[in-house]
Structures are given as C-alpha cells and as structure tokens.
Amino acid sequence: MNRNKPGNPHSKIPVKPLLIIAAFIFLCLAASAFAGYFGDAYVTGSIADAVSLIPFLSTDSSSHSITGMIFNGLTKFDKNLNIIGDLAERWDVSEDGKEITFYLRKNVRWHDGMPLTTRDIKFTFEAILDPKNACPYVSSYRDIQSVDIIDDYTVKFTYSQPYAPALSKLGIEIVPEHILKGEDLRTSKFKRDPLGCGAYILEKWKSDQYLILNSNHDYFEHRPYIDKYVMRVIPDLAVQFLELATGGIDTMGLTAYQYFYRTASEKFKSKFNTYTYLSRAYAYVGYNLEDPLFSDKRVRKALSYAINKKEIIDGVLLGMGEPCTGPFFKETPYYSKKAEQYKYDKERALELLGEAGWRDSDGDGILDKDGAPFKFKLITNQGNKDREDIATIVQREWQELGVDVEIQIIAWAAFLKEYVDKKNFQAVILGWSLPMDPDCFVVWHSSSAVEGGLNFISFKNEEVDALIEEGRRTFDVYERIRIYNRIHEIIAEEAPYTFLYFPYARVAISNRFKGIEPAPAGIGYNFVDWYVDPGEVRY
Amino acid sequence: MLSYIIRRSLLIIPMLLGISLITLMIMHLAPGDPASLRYGLNPEVGGSARTQFREIYGLDKPVHVQYFMWLKRMAVLDFGNSFIDDRPVIQKIGERLPATLLLSIASILLIYSISIPIGISSAVKANSPYDRLMTIVVFIGYATPSFWFALILIMFFGVRLEWFPISGMRPWYVDYYPFFASLKDLAWRMVLPVMATSLVSLAGISRYMRSGMLEVLRQDYIRTARAKGLSERRVIYRHALKNALLPIVTIASMILPSLIGGSFIIETIFAWPGMGRLGYEAIMNHDLPTVMGVGIISVFLTLLGLILADVLYAVVDPRIRYE
C-alpha cells in the first residue's frame, strides 16, 4: 500500500542539546503544517450491499454512504447544520427568490482530470428532471424552469416560484457530463463504475462482499489522510459485532444494549472509542384523524399526557434518547422550545377524557361513552424491536387510564400497502428520518393526505398549510425559524401524533483513528481530516 | 430408454410454464408491491416516483399481460433486468453462483464422506451401543438449528480461539495475496460454513445408508457369501455395499437443485455472497424478474435431477428397464 508519512516525530535525534532543540522546533513546525499522516484503511460494515452509484437514482443508505464519498454537490451542510458551499464558492438569490446564481470553485477536477464546469451542473439537473430516468427525488426539483450557463463557472437556476429548500436540495451530487452524455442512465455501466470529483475513487466492487475506495490525491479540499475506505457487506448484526470486536471492521453503530453491556470491558475500551450524537429521526404514535375515536382533540391530548416519554426512553433505549415534542430536528433552531411538552400527567389525561365524555360508567375498568367501550388497535411493523417495545409500554400506560388497546405487528410489505397507504388503521407507531431542510410539506400539508401520501393520519390545518407554503417561499433564515417554530407549536397543540423521542446514534470506532469531532451533523462530515498515527497503521 | 428420456425432457416444458405462472401469481397475491417497498415512507421521495416506477417496469399492466411479456423474453432466454438495480438477472445470478457451488459441493462431499461410513458401520453393528450412540449423534445434528450452530462455531473457533476468520468469502485485501496464499485463505474461510451446513444433513444420508445396508444384509446372497467362507470385510464391502448404495445414488441426483439454491441463513451469518441471499432479498423486495429467474433455474434443475435419478437408477440396477 502506498503510504506517505511526513514528519515522523519518533525518528532518532542526535543527543547534542542544541540539535535536540532545533529538531524539536522543526518537528513542532512539521506537526503544525501536517494535521495528520497519510495511510491506512477505514473498514466499515453494512448489512446491505450498495445498489447503484448514480447519486440521484438510488434511495438506499448503503449507496448513499458511498456516493457521498465519490461525488460532491453545489452546497453541503457544515458541522452545525448550516448550508455552506461545496462545489459552489458562493451564491446569490434574486430579490423575488426565483433565481439562484451559483459561482463554482475553479479548482475542481473529475477523477479523470477534466475540469468540473457548469455544463456538468446543467447536465445533472436535466437528467434528474428527465422522466425517462425516473429519478425518485424529482418532486423536489419540479419547480426548476431552466438552468442557464452564464460562463464555465457561473450557473443560474430559475424557479417558477420561490422555493427555499432549493439551497439544500441543489446540494445533490453532480455527475460528469462528458462521461454520461447520451447514455441510458438506468442501464449505464456508470452505476457500477462511477467517476466523480470527490475525496475517494472507486477501486473495486464485489457484489455482496465488499467495495473499496482509494483516496483522491487531487481532491480540491486536500488529499484525505486515510488512503482507503472499505465497506464490507455483513448482513447479520450479531456477526458484525463479532467482526468489530476481533478487528475485522473498524466501526459499527451499536444498539443501546451493546453500548452499555457489550462494550464495557477494558479489552473493548482499549481498542475503541465510542461516540454518541442525536439521530435526525424521531419515533411517534400517530392517530388516524379520520377515525371518529380520535377526531376529538381532547382525546388525543389525553393519550399524549398518559404516555411517559422518560419511561419509554429508559425502557426502550436504556436512556439513550431525548424527548421529542414536534416534527423538527432538536439540534436546529426550527425546533420550538415553547411547544407543549405533554409531561406525564395521568390526572390531566383522565380529566380531558372526562371532558370528552369518556367515563367508566359500568365499572368494568374500561372507559365508555354512549355504551361503547374505549378500545382500539395499535399497529406497527414487524422487525423493529424498539417499536414493538414502545407498543408494549404504551399499551400498559393507556390501560391504566382505562383504555383497551390491542397491539398488532404486521410484516413490512403488508403494513405499507394494506394499512398505511390505504389509511386503514387507528393508531400507528412509526418514525420519520428528517431531511436536512425543515420543509415538511409531504408529511404535514393537507394536500399530502391522499391515498399513498405520507400524511396518512389526515392532518388538515389551514394555518399549518399556509405556514408550510410560506416557509417554502422564504429564504431568510430568521423568518423561517419563526415559521417553523409556529408550525411546531400548532402541531404540538393539535396532538395528531404523540411525539416520543430522538434516539442517540452510538458509534464505536477503532481508537487508532484521530481527528473525529462529534457535532450536530454527526461525525462523518470531516472524514477527509481523520488520520492514523504512523505507529498505529494497520493496513 | 432414449425415447423415455426424450419424453421426460419434453414434459419439462409444460411443467416450467405451470410453475412459472404459479410463482408469478403467488408474488402478485403476496401483500405489498415493489414500488411502495422501494419508496414507501421516504419523505424525500414524491408520490409520482411510485407511478413512474410501475410504468417503467410494466407493473401497471394486468398480470396476464405481464406474464406474456415475461414469456416472450424467456423464449430468447432473456431473464430480464432486476427491479432493484436494473442489472440483467442472469448477470446477478452469475456473480453469486460460484460462491454457492463452492460451498454446496464442499459440504456434499463432507456429508457423504462422513455419513456413508456411519451408515455402514451402524448397520453392521445394528442395535449395538455404537449404533445407538451414532443414532443419537446424527439426530442431535439434525435437530440443531443451523443459525445457532453457526454462531457457536463463530464464537468458539473465530472469536475465542481465533483459528478461523469470522465471516466473508474473500478478504477485501485478497489482491495482495500471492496465488497459493489466496487459495489457502479461501479454504480456511470455507471450514466453518461447510461444518455448519453439513451437520444438519448427516442424519438423512446416514439413515438411508443404514437401512439400505440392513436390507441387503438380510438377503440370501449375503448368506451365500458368508457360507462360502468369505471374510466379513469382503462380504460387506464387495457384496453388500454395492447393492446398498443404490438408493444413495438416486438421492444424490436429487440434490442438484439444493446445490445452486444455497442457504439464506448460512450465507447471511457467514456473509457469504451466494444464491440464498440473492433469492431472499429478491423476494423481500418483490423483485419479480430475479425471483422468477432464480425460481426457473431451480425448477429446471429439479426436473433435470428427477430424470437423472431415473436414468441412474436404470444404469446401476440392471433389473430396471424403461419402455
């Protein structure tokens, strides 16, 4: 393996004091000039193989973790989740918000040495919009009227209406025009043999086995310190953990149980560092608002008050989570701190149910109204242990109120098609991963409450609709914070979901990797700066 | 004989048609569809993506139309492209087949080389403590869940003793190995998966062998052989074994489909890139062309195995003749 280790601090030094001092100064200088050392490989495990390395055609996380290493987009998020330029040095948004002009970095080259220009940008977005490529993300780009090349490094996007999420959506990875022009993207060899401009270059991909990336020495930020990035496909998580413990892989996301009980040994601690950061995903209980049982807001609020979020976080995640009160990421300012928290309060819950007319009039321990008992079905999908555990805890908590809940756990394919898509359920336990932009049109706007839409609980609120539309038109960050805080507060007040928690991601990484700094964006954002000390290089 | 083989071979065609139709029907009756499995509950994917997906792959057409489209392609041996990654199904199968064949051939060799001697010796010493012990041993193997046994093997030989690698068929740094080291590494990595697959199958073959042998040992010609004063060794290995092997030979031809089918459980645990995982993932994602492709090939091999069994039976047993 090709290694380059500048400035080795352990090299033999002559004993003469002056020389020692000189050498010391020299080494300090060397160390400040080189933040890290080149070499070694970072081996990850994945339960599934990548599918396609054309960034805007794949939807699976394995493919995305690889395309993120090979390609870059116009914009990206920094460690504090602010939008910054990636391929673009800067950009201007016109007064009416309909035109965005990007000015590209001039030093970016494709892996074959060709310069990256605005022709590639235009090509990529035209490919995304081309119906024959069936890009799954096309709905985020539909308002693009034209992409105009002003010169090699200036490109103007014109939208039919202002669309604030554009700045993050235009961060989708760019593909090379000179390679792909005239190719049928769906069947092109490019998806197995891509050429990008990013920090790493694909060396080899063996289906269902492994995928090897080599560092790009000419990467425009700087040459990544770690020479190889390897993704091994290990479908079984128990086996993946054994591979981690014996050094077969260098990193793995841990379950809460593994984090507390399997990694506590001195032997494990001597080899690994563990990092935790809040995941961009929350779990919730959703109530079908078309069901007469849940049409009364007081009932939904009562059910929310009766759920002890702390108990769920302790029971399901062994405490590794943060309570959630609304549909935005807790690490961003869009998440409102003033929204209704629904602190566990059984008395308040009973009071609200009483106001709504639910009482135990026949003394059987179950609340009833007009002779009908308060009972319903709570569904979730099979194969997610956390959700099954939540269901059990929530069932008991509601039972204490006098609500009879039946849990039904359904295989994923049927769960989606027969229950969620058709809105054929009463209450459901699910989770959302949050996109980078706070725009929540597809989940909370009333027009998404159609069959197969993601607003399957049929939440319809005119004020929220108007705010969502306003949020899409508004580029000003402070204005957007106000809008999304308000949406958060209304949704919390309406209680169509009981928001449960954001789990912490728990990652173990071999401690030979240095330079890792957990931030709201997670840990992967500065991968090109990670390095391994020369004495600890493994591969 | 020849006309029998031809007749049997021609029967394969209607069988394949029927089975492929049933497979397609079952996949359509199963809840869920490939578009919602692929794009469902993803807030970044719009609803139009699902419609577009269905149009591109012809899933918006009625089932019988889809079946005829598939038949038309099959007529020129085109298995179609996978829904998951748009790659030709035959190419995906081609990538996984060698890994599965390697594992299954090695385990079959191991199974036969252990269970035939067990069967013979148990029959010769029928009802002795040795026979009982062997019965218990092979049935414990039969009753052991293979995923559990595989994990125990990994824990003991991979993690505790560190004798064998835990998972994977080839290490990612295989290119840095010289040829023989690479070969040795492969053999080393096969040990645990082969052990895990073989344990379960010991019972079947050894019991067949034992009962076949017992049956033969009761025959008059064995008594005659003994009466001639032949040594017990000669009686068993020259006279009895040949005849007792008959059922084993025919069973052997039945393993053809399992040769390429692979085991999803073993392949998942040992991260082995084989057919079992391909088939399972195709079914879970409703990847029709891949499911049909894997299905058709296994059905074809099963039918071929049946013919082969008939032919072999006639070859090894002169009493059998086909008209």
Image: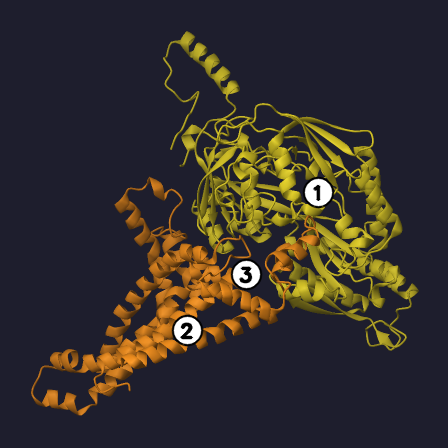
Chain colours: A yellow, B orange
Earlier in the chain: of badge 2 and badge 3, it is 2
- Residue A519: image quadrant is top right
**Quadrant for the C terminus of chain A in the image:** top left
Residue holding disc 2: B143
Q: What residue does disc 1 label?
A: A141
Question: Amino acid type of disc 1?
Answer: Tyr
Question: Which quarter of the rendered picture does the N terminus of chain A lie within?
Answer: top left
Dot 1 and dot 2 residues touching (CB under 8 Å)? no
**Front one among B136 and A379:** A379
Q: Crowding near pointer 2: few (<14 within 10 Å), some, many (20+)?
A: few
The chain under label 3 reads B
Report the front residue among B94 and A453.
Answer: B94
Which mark is drawn over residue A301?
none
- Measure how far apart labels 1 and 2 are at the Cα level: 57 Å
The residue beneath circle 3 is: B287
Q: Position of residue A208 (x, y in %)?
A: 46, 52
The kind of residue on which mark 2 rests is Ala
Residue type marked 3 = Asp
